Amino acid sequence: MSRPLPKAGRYALRVASLAIALGVWQLLTSLDIDLWLRFSQFPTVTDVASAFADRLSGPDYWTDLTDSLTRILTGFLLAAVLGVATGVLIARSRLAEDLLGPVLEVVRPIPAIALVPVAILLFPSNEQGIVFITFTAAFFPVLVSTRHAVRALTPVWEEAVVTMGGGRWRILASVVLPGALPGIFGGLSVGIGVSWICVISAEMISGQYGVGYRTWQDYTVVNYAGVFVGMVTIGVLGWLTSTAVELLGRRLTRWLPRTSYAGGRPLRRARATSTAVAVSPRAKEGIPHDQLV
Amino acid sequence: MTSSSDRRPRPGTGAALALHGTALGRPDAPVLDAVELDVAPGEILTVVGPSGCGKSTLLRTLAGLLAPLSGRVTQDSRPLTRPSADRALVFQEDALLPWRTLRANVELPLAIKGLPRADRRAQAESWLARVGLADHARQLPHRVSGGQRQRAQLARALAGAPRAVLMDEPFGALDAQTRAGMQDLLVEVLRGTGATVVFVTHDVDEALFLGDRVALLGGGRLTAVRDVPRPRDRSAHDDPARVALRRDVLSSLGT
């Protein structure tokens, strides 16, 4: 292991990494390198940058941006709420598991983007169809990780609250949701990523406006620089939204003892037994959760 | 020190907790049979026995987490069917909610009782002060020591003003010195609460120090309940009655 770099050094390293990637791209494209990979048709970094500047000054870019963001946020928030609710329900109730489990397990492997025909049949407007696809994409990761996190909760937490006279709702609010939060945020992080993939694909197929729609339009009119502007936009938006989810998650699970954290103070790791939170696989000990639901 | 003679159950007086002809365990794995036990109000009953003898099963049944397989389990003569705030449980493992500060953990039973925020905060802080954690009220559990966590668990259990406190080897994971301190603290904190205590341990000396009476488990039975000579005194090692009792207890446990 090498000595850890100071904070400023690490940022410099990250910027340098990005700069080198762009430099290589610029070199390969401006020199029209045509080996096995063909870069001669590729727009250069400067082409893309000037196309980007043009776009930024026009009205369409911002309409596309807000359209895509509205779609993804609506779909993702719906998925977060319903995914957590369904995950908790399935983890805590045998009846819910039997009723919902089979349907969900069959629907889960279907790629959300393959639901485009379904969305077109079901929803009166394109807009709702896209939100539906985005929702489906994020719903399953959230559902599955919530279910796992709830099942892995340490049984004594629940028993402690039960022996204080706490009822079902108290357990839900004071034990299940806070205890499962680290796992839930794992699902939300995956979910926001999958949501972007699906919102862009859905826009390419059936959208009007939106970053995905614009990117595909540019491709059909052979505006390759425009395609790259779209791709960079998607990348940046995806990065920003998943960072937001990540930060929120870290903030809400600040109680988690962390060994060391990038940029953070290394915290003392207290007894691991008491703190292995969503991962202690001891669901069998104690009474089955179902009895307490 | 406590005068223990008036704490022991006498015929005709109501027991705080009682098991009559009770079989305990899971249906597929019964551990204890035909248990007859009365715990007197305000008494500290310690329960000793080898590992796997059903100590924890007994406690979980008293807590209402496990239904008896047969027989009757009562608290103050009423059948005991489900967990309730009348019987607080203190665990060996760390059962504090790790995302709550110590104070918020102690506030929890009070919140469940519906106390207004200011009241429960004040009560939680006074309980934390009584167990010597006044300065740690706003710490998260993983930032304090194991002994401090168990103190906070004790404060949380007592904050809800339960009629009985059930303790499952609460000091089992602590080092010897911390453990002795915790035993003294427990006796001190319990004074004046009037709570009945059932304290499970595998440590005979702990059982004899804390208990007004000691219940012995072994071979799937409750084999004996013995009175412990009083006063409670850690230095009275050579008291002949104690020495004899200790020898008896150890031999009946097969050590």
Image (cartoon, coloured by chain):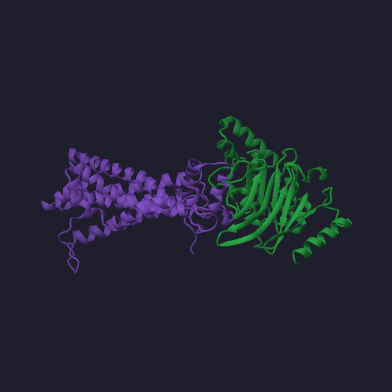
Q: Position of residue A236 (x, y in %)?
A: 29, 48
Residue B216 location in percent, x, y?
73, 58
Q: Position of residue A263 (x, y in %)?
A: 47, 50
Q: Is residue B83 visible?
A: yes
Q: Determine which quarter of the picture holds residue B201.
A: bottom right
* Left or right of B171 in this view: B234: right
Q: Residue at x 76, y 50 (%)?
A: B210
Q: Is residue B149 visible?
A: no
Q: Nearer the viewer, residue A290 or A70?
A: A290
* Apparent side of residue B101 relative to residue A104 in the rendered image (left or right): right
**Left or right for B29, reference A74:** right
Q: Nearer the viewer, residue A223 or A252?
A: A252
Outermost residue, bottom side: A36
| Nearer to us in this view, B112 or B185 | B112
- Vertical order, A158 against B253 (above or below): above
Q: Is residue A119 left or right of residue A179?
A: left
Point out the residue furthest to the left here: A221
Residue A49 at x, y = what percent? 22, 49
Chain B on-screen colour:
green
User: Residue at image x 87%, y 56%?
Assistant: B241
Identify the colour of chain A in the image. purple
